[in-house]
Image (tube, helix red, strand yellow):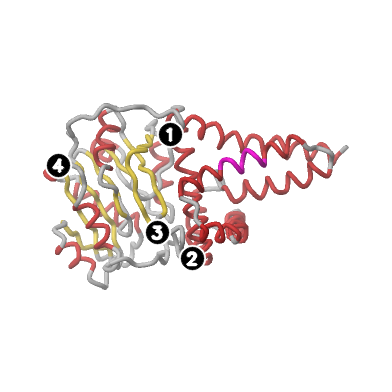
Amino acid sequence: MVAAAVALACLVLATVACLGYLVPTLASLRRRRESPREPTHAFTILIPAHNEELSLPATLRSLAVLDYPPELVRVCVVADNCTDGTARVAFEAGAKCLARHDVANRGKGHALAFGLDRVLRDATGVVLILDADCELTPGALRALDLTFAAGAEAAQTVVRSRNADDGSAGFVAAVGAAFDAGTAAGWDALGFALPLRGTGMAFRRDLLERIPWDAFGAVEDAEYGVRLKHAGVRVRYCAGAEVACEAPPSVSELCQQRRRWRGAGLRASKPLVLAHLTLTVGVSVACGFRLWPVALVVAFALLYLRAMCAVGITRKRFGLLLGSPVVVSRLGWVTLAGLVRRGASWDRTSRARRA
């Protein structure tokens, strides 16, 4: 009797988690058609960069081919405590560069506060924050212009991983990003606010003036997102704007990244949800439940199959799929460890460098 009650409780929790992914994914299938318009918003693209001499050129090249009036776009790089040629790369590409030297206050949050303080002194309508190792799709600013024209104060773009073939870690990260993209679009369609992702987040000038950036922790995006939520600001999702970035190239480096991210909390941890589902299926089947756990497994399988199709399925990636349970298990353990210990410092995650 006790075992059956435990199995039932686990099934209920797993069902709630499943619906939390399934409902917004279904809602995302209904896409709104937006009429094209002449762009009106002036964008400042702010790029915090710490020793990004090798990866920054590709980022700046993607900004040079944006489908948006060039007179309405300004690119500003914050060379934050750099010891390489990051500033030189920015200058050569025609971007404005702000050099920051403050070894006592290190980290992306401080670099953003420094940059925002200076770019907001000039006329600009929207500030888009982009990491120095990310690339923006050509039509991103037009999509964001539509989002802000519709009344948004803050928006988050799609964030996709571009290195799905770099081992099981790269494949897991790419599928996870595609999974999140589907659910995020649905939550936005249902009227909910979206979390900020650190890169590809955009804010109206008056919002940044009303709620100044003062998030300096290891998860600065989550910290600022909490401030916006408390102020009643809804972060909208801009499905037409995409940022492509590279996930850490190895399992250990991916775990390092997730250790930093776990400061945002345990909610929405897909590895833990999958671990709970596995435990639930085992316990419930042993207690005589059949149809319910099978339905949950099928639902989750379809959700992940949709995400894998969005990434693209090849023979190589099918092979990488076989190694994904190990990666997911390690990520789940990293998240659980966050209950005991939270990282307090910012550590740069290694990525493959692109010139």
Find residue 279 and report its horizontal and vertical position in percent. Answer: 73, 48
The residue furthest front is: 315
Question: N-terminal of the two: label 3 or label 2?
Answer: 3
Residue in view at x 49 percent, y 46 percent: 309
Distance from disc 3 to disc 4, alpha carbons, whole Å, reads 28 Å
- Magenta region: 297-303
Residue tagged by mark 4?
A: 69
Which amino acid does the dot numbered 3 rest on? Glu
**Looking at the rendering, in which quadrant would you find the C terminus?**
bottom left
Rendered residue at 48%/60% (across/down)? 170
- Cα distance between the residues tagged 3 and 2: 12 Å
- Say what secondary structure mark 4 lies in: loop
Contact (Cβ within 8 Å) of mark 3 with mark 4: no
Q: Residues within 10 Å of mark 2 (few under 14, many from 20)?
A: some
Residue at label 3? Answer: 246
Whole-number angstrom distance, CA of label 1 to CA of label 4: 29 Å
Indicate which label's residue lies in the foreground, 3 or 2: 3
Contact between labelled residues 1 and 3, with CB atoms less than 8 Å apart: no
| Disc 3: CA contacts within 10 A as few (<14), some (14-19) or many (>=20) | many
Query: Which callout, 3 or 1, points at the residue further toward the start of the chain?
Result: 1
Q: Mark 1 — residue?
A: 193
Q: State the count of labels.
A: 4
Q: CA distance from mark 4 to mark 2?
A: 39 Å
Q: Amino acid at mark 2?
A: Glu
Magenta segment, principal secondary structure?
helix
> Which residue position holds label 2?
253
